[in-house]
Amino acid sequence: MAKPTNTVTFTDNSTGKTVELPVIPGTIGPDVVDIRTLYSETGLFTFDPGFGMTASCKSDLTYIDGEVGQLLHGGYSISELAEKSDFLEVAYLLLHGELPNSQEKQEFDYAITHHTMVHEQLHTFFRGFRRDAHPMAILCGVTGALSAFYHDSTDINDPQQRMIASRRLIAKMPTLAAMAYKYSLGQPFNYPRNNLTYAENFLQMCFAVPAQDYEINPVLADAMNKILILHADHEQNASTSTVRLAGSSGANPFACIAAGIAALWGPAHGGANEAVLTMLNEIGDRSRIPEFIKRARDKNDPFRLFGFGHRVYKNFDPRAKVMRDSCHEVLNNLGIKNEPLLDLAMELEDIALKDEYFIEKKLYPNVDFYSGIILKAMGFPTSMFTVLFAVARTVGWISQWKEMIEDPLQRIGRPRQLYIGPAERSYTPVDER
């Protein structure tokens, strides 16, 4: 951890007491004020709902500059990685901090590819769910259950077991996700195939059926590869923070990732691309677009335009341009025409890039807008959108978890609070109240 380079002075106006707090610099981005001694010296906590201004850890994995629209993994821009790399190479980068050389990549790809099968008894486990269970409910439950099947990789203090668990989760998550999808359809599970890439394998496990051969569409496989890369990690978001918090207690990695899946399920987080399709269904027709834009401008109307703007990116989402190009490639390749929802989406995109309101508010289409359209065009139901997000983000979660376990500064998470309830009072018997 970088050493403090200067200090800030904190003065408690109620007591007049002054303390000097060290300022710690990062490589790039804002410096941080180290408040670890604030309570012991002043008796005060800080108040930061949502932790939007609080650094909970140090990390060398991912960096976001929302003001300029920048996303880096290990110093590499997301757009360059999406165009030149593949998902497993990005996974290696997040896990190890450097891009692999040829031999390292070959070994890593082989290890992941040959660990994609899951224990056969998991098939029985799936059948315990109702046939109409949401795929995210299934994925969350089955991922947590992996710790009951792989006892040899749950000791978080053993570096070898941490490595095995990390690779198992990255390898098996697309298999579990595809099984959740197939189960929801009432179709047989497809086993993974070692002669396919990570993205290709996931598509065949989702869409192949025993009655006929499944041909890999390279445009769809490339789009899936990009979707996985673009969602691999995104700094200390809600689900990543959940994984770290769960991991800080010493929980096994499978339980921690299951906790991340649960957090991702929320519509304000991983459900955003599903919300885009729901919004398009609500709009229904191009002729109603002006009505809904008017509603979006009305501060008193609860309606929200999902897929536009971003909490972190105040300019543009750097992932969106890559996804936009991929989206149009997919639609052209599939020859999709006269599909009402997709036509409506393209109309909204055109308006958002030209309309003064969108430009002024910087409500550019984000990655969720385009990924939702791509996934629908591929044939995925909206209930699977967040599941695919989980497949991609597992790499980021496990990398963040690994980094936390290996960080000597980390302690069990224990946020503080500002208590505003009653002060101590005496109990009154029920017949006297």
Image (spheres, rainbow, N blue to C red):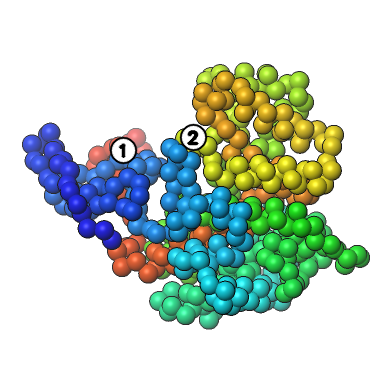
Q: Position of residue 221 (x, y in %)?
A: 73, 57
Q: Is residue 144 visible?
A: no
419 left or right of 67 in image: left
Q: Looking at the rendering, which quadrant does residue 89 occupy?
A: bottom right
Q: Looking at the rendering, which quadrant does residue 343 occupy?
A: top right
For label 2, the SS is loop
Q: Is residue 76 visible?
A: yes
Q: Position of residue 210 (x, y in %)?
A: 88, 67
Circle 1 Cα neighbour tier, 10 Å, few/some/many (<14 / 14–19 / ≥20): few
Residue at image point 60% right, 35% down: 365
Residue at image point 64% right, 39% down: 369
Which of the two residues, 126 or 319, is positioned nearer the viewer here?
319
Q: Position of residue 93 (x, y in %)?
A: 50, 64
Circle 2 Cα neighbour tier, 10 Å, few/some/many (<14 / 14–19 / ≥20): some
Give the total of numbered labels. Answer: 2
The amino acid marked with disc number 2 is Asn
Residue at image point 44% right, 47% down: 64
Q: Looking at the rendering, which quadrant does residue 170 occupy?
A: bottom right
Q: Earlier in the sequence, mark 1 or mark 2?
A: 2
Badge 1 vs badge 2, beta-carbon distance below 8 Å: no
Mark whose residue sits in front, 1 or 2: 2
Q: Which residue is mark 1?
A: 421
For label 1, the SS is loop
Relative vertical location of residue 323 with respect to residue 365 in this rendering, above or below: below
Give the spatial CA distance, label 1 vs label 2.
40 Å
Which of the two residues, 227 or 423, is positioned nearer the viewer here?
227
83 left or right of 377 in image: left
Residue farthest along the right direction in this orientation: 211
408 left or right of 170 in image: left
Question: Which numbered disc covers residue 344?
Answer: none
Q: Which residue is mark 2?
A: 315
